[in-house]
Image (cartoon, helix red, strand yellow):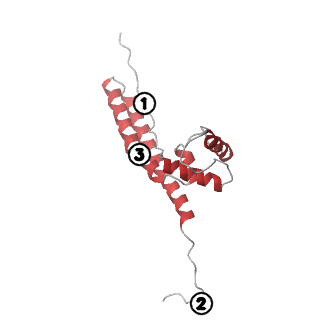
Amino acid sequence: MAILIEVQPAPGKIRITPDVVRASQQKLTEEGYKPGTPDGKMGPVTRAAIRKYQEHEGLKVTATLDESTLSHLGIGGGKIVATAPGDIGRGAKAAAHNVKEGHPIAAGKAMGQGFGRAGKAVGEGTKSGVKGAKHKVAPKKSDESTPPPR
């Protein structure tokens, strides 16, 4: 008797570059956390600051720059969104395995998880991009002396 194993897709990892770490360190400093010198390196002081930030924000405490933490910091929106195609691909691969092994329901779940993670990545990345952009764009000054166009 063969044992059939259901497979579900693994979540994608965000590629954390020194630039992302540096931007996170700068943002954590602005928020009152003390990640150390913004040098782009994930040392113990930076991890402790991330941990405190995650605890304060009610995030899952990982002491890493995960998708949710980056989104809350308003950093790395493009990197978060970039994981979406891989999430769909991993869901499809797991679904194909499940179909081959005779698990059509598990295959549907695998595809759903892949698309769900991709959707979450796009949403979190967009939120991060918008949050980061509002800090970079100066508010538009209105000139009340000029009448509105007709």
Q: Earlier in the sequence, mark 2 or mark 3?
A: 3
Query: In front of the other: label 3 or label 1?
Result: 3
Residue 138 placement (x, y as % from top left): 56, 71
Q: Which residue is mark 1?
A: 8
Seen in the picture, residue 145 relative to 60 is either above or below; the reply is below
**Callout 2 amino acid:** Ser
Whether residue 72 appears in this view of the structure is no
| Residue 99 lies in quadrant | top left
| Residue 44 lies in quadrant | top right
| Furthest residue toward left | 100
- For disc 3, the neighbor class at 10 Å (few under 14, some 14 to 19, many from 20) is many
Residue 52 placement (x, y as % from top left): 67, 43
| Alpha-carbon span between mark 2 and mark 3 | 48 Å
Image-based side of 22 in relation to 103, left or right: right
Residue 90 placement (x, y as % from top left): 38, 36
| Alpha-carbon span between mark 1 and mark 2 | 62 Å
What residue appears at the point 52 percent right and 45 percent down from the top-left corner? 67
Q: Which residue is mark 2?
A: 145
What residue appears at the point 54 percent right and 51 percent down from the top-left corner? 22
50 and 96: which is toward the camera? 50
Q: Earlier in the sequence, mark 1 or mark 2?
A: 1
- For disc 2, the neighbor class at 10 Å (few under 14, some 14 to 19, many from 20) is few
Query: In front of the other: label 1 or label 2?
Result: 2
| Furthest residue toward top | 1
- Secondary element under disc 3, as helix, strand or loop, is helix
Tell me whether circle 3 and circle 1 mark residues in contact (CB < 8 Å).
no
Residue 110 placement (x, y as % from top left): 41, 34
53 and 98: which is toward the camera? 53
| Alpha-carbon span between mark 3 and mark 1 | 16 Å
- Secondary element under disc 2, as helix, strand or loop, is loop
- For disc 1, the neighbor class at 10 Å (few under 14, some 14 to 19, many from 20) is many
Q: Which residue is mark 3?
A: 84
